[in-house]
Image: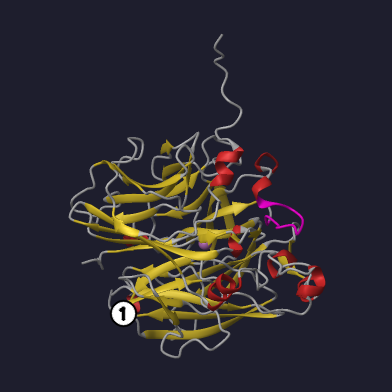
Amino acid sequence: MQTLSKPSKSYNRQDWQRGYDSQPQEMEGWVEAISGEIPPQLQGTLFRNGPGLMDINGDRFHHPFDGDGLICAFTFDQGRVHFRNRFVRTEGFLKEQTEGKICYRGVFGTQKAGGWLGNLFDLNLKNIANTNVIYWGDRLLALWEAALPHRLDPRTLETIGLDNLDGLLKPGGAFSAHPRIDPHSELDNGAPCLVNFALSAGPVSKLTLYEFSPQGQCLRQFEQPIPGFAFIHDFAITPHYYLFFQNPIAFNPLPFVFGVKGAGQCISFQEQEPTKIVIIPRDRSTGEPTRTLKVKAGFVFHHANAWENADGTLGLESICYDSFPEVEPDADFRETKFDTLPPSQLWRFTIDPQAGTVERQLRDHRAVEFPTLHPQWVGRKHRYCYLAAADQVGDNAPLQGLIKLDSETGTQEFYSFAPRGFVSEPVFVPRGAGEEEGWIMMLVYDAARHGSDLAIFDAANITAGPVATVHLKLHIPYGLHGNWTGKTFVD
Ligand code: CO
């Protein structure tokens, strides 16, 4: 007899876990297996990054955030698609591949062999270059927020080496993995500029802000101290401000120094404390002060967008967690108890810098991550936001779908790859100036064939499902971030 009751879960844990299997293979070539039709207007390259190796010869890294950066490039040229994937040849990757064992400690708890004694006082971390990849000013850069970027050849994805951005970054320095592109910089007569920050954390933390011309020259740079230890992964921009969330955390470095825990495991969430919103003016000639406001916001990795309202208030949308998902030394990330964790949800903040007040409002109940929108709306009030999402409303669960939220009507569109598909970050590829004119690209791990697909949606109609799907011969482990460029680099 058939039962009509809804399955209790939209996924199977073993399916989800296999999407984290290491992918040591590198390949390249024109892709033959395509469902639907690649839109002929699509011309350019999607670069994306994420941890590709989760172990060295079977010795597992403690957490995927410690995995070596694997770059993928999808080139779209006259209705055809070329694929290439390559590891970033970091110093640490080369050493560990040569020696065949884990040689470094990871921020998220990976330890060398030998227990705490083998890790005692070893503060030498591996720059794993695994968080983002962006093409800007004729440079392709693989980013990891705690160290310098690696420069890659956009044609071959070969690693050229560490890049200090023409001497801007000092040895041992940092460069965030979350640059923002202002599509119309007011200080540059409306030309686009790339904005990024570097964080130096300590009892007084220091933010360094950078703005770069389309040719890659540094246009503006300054430092902003902020009191207290800070863990800041992302930020948001408007035409006149940088917005940072300083999450309420405490950092006790001793277990890290003494070889017991990774640095990222020494962060503890301070539930009773508010988040500090730091609002920094971009135009340093006005003398306008930096302002700090407080709000209960939980823990935030990612912001969707920020904007300036006509009444002088600022809008900001962010993905909020009830607490920091702490990475326990003896816990296995693959056994994550989704059911016991609160879902990460999209909230809208309305900030009044003059009055010093902040209001917040939940946008949608579904668990979401990796927000994106049409790049022309970065820093401007958007109507549509696209996010990777859980299949079922209210459940915290792996990301299996794509959701589009319409803030004007309050309606939404949704498409799910459940039960056997698991998604990574959506990337918006613009086709025209209209806010829905473009495509959404997202990598989908298909557990049914242990392979990955690149799904391409028309941003104006998510519910209809992908207009085209590119089927790769291999699986790409769940990734982090990527970017589109209108340039192609294949012959
Ligand atoms: Co991120």
Q: Position of residue 221 (x, y in %)?
A: 46, 85
Q: Position of residue 206 (x, y in %)?
A: 61, 81
Q: Is residue 332 magenta?
A: yes
Residue in the image at 68% along x and 65% along y: 110
Can residue 451 be seen by looking at this rendering? yes
Q: How is the image coloured?
A: secondary structure
Residue situated in front as seen by the camera: 63 or 222: 63
Location of residue 105 (image quadrant): bottom right
Task: Give the position of the C terminus as an image quadrant.
Answer: bottom left
Q: Position of residue 218 (x, y in %)?
A: 39, 85
Q: Which residues are magenta?
A: 324-333
Location of residue 428 (image quadrant): bottom left
Query: Mark 1 CB in 8 Å range of ligand 1?
Result: no
Q: Is residue 131 left or right of residue 258?
A: left
Q: Position of residue 37 (x, y in %)?
A: 23, 43
Q: Amino acid at mark 1?
A: Asp
Residue furthest bottom in the image: 167
Residue in the image at 48% along x and 68% along y: 178
Can residue 238 be seen by looking at this rendering? no
From this view, report whether residue 212 is shown above or below residue 484: below
Task: Give the position of the N terminus as an image quadrant.
Answer: top right
- What main secondary structure does the magenta stretch of the protein show? loop
Describe the element under mark 1 as helix, strand or loop. helix
**Residue named by callout 1:** 188
Q: Is residue 146 left or right of residue 83?
A: right
From this view, report whether residue 328 is shown above or below residue 267: above
Residue in the image at 59% along x and 62% along y: 65
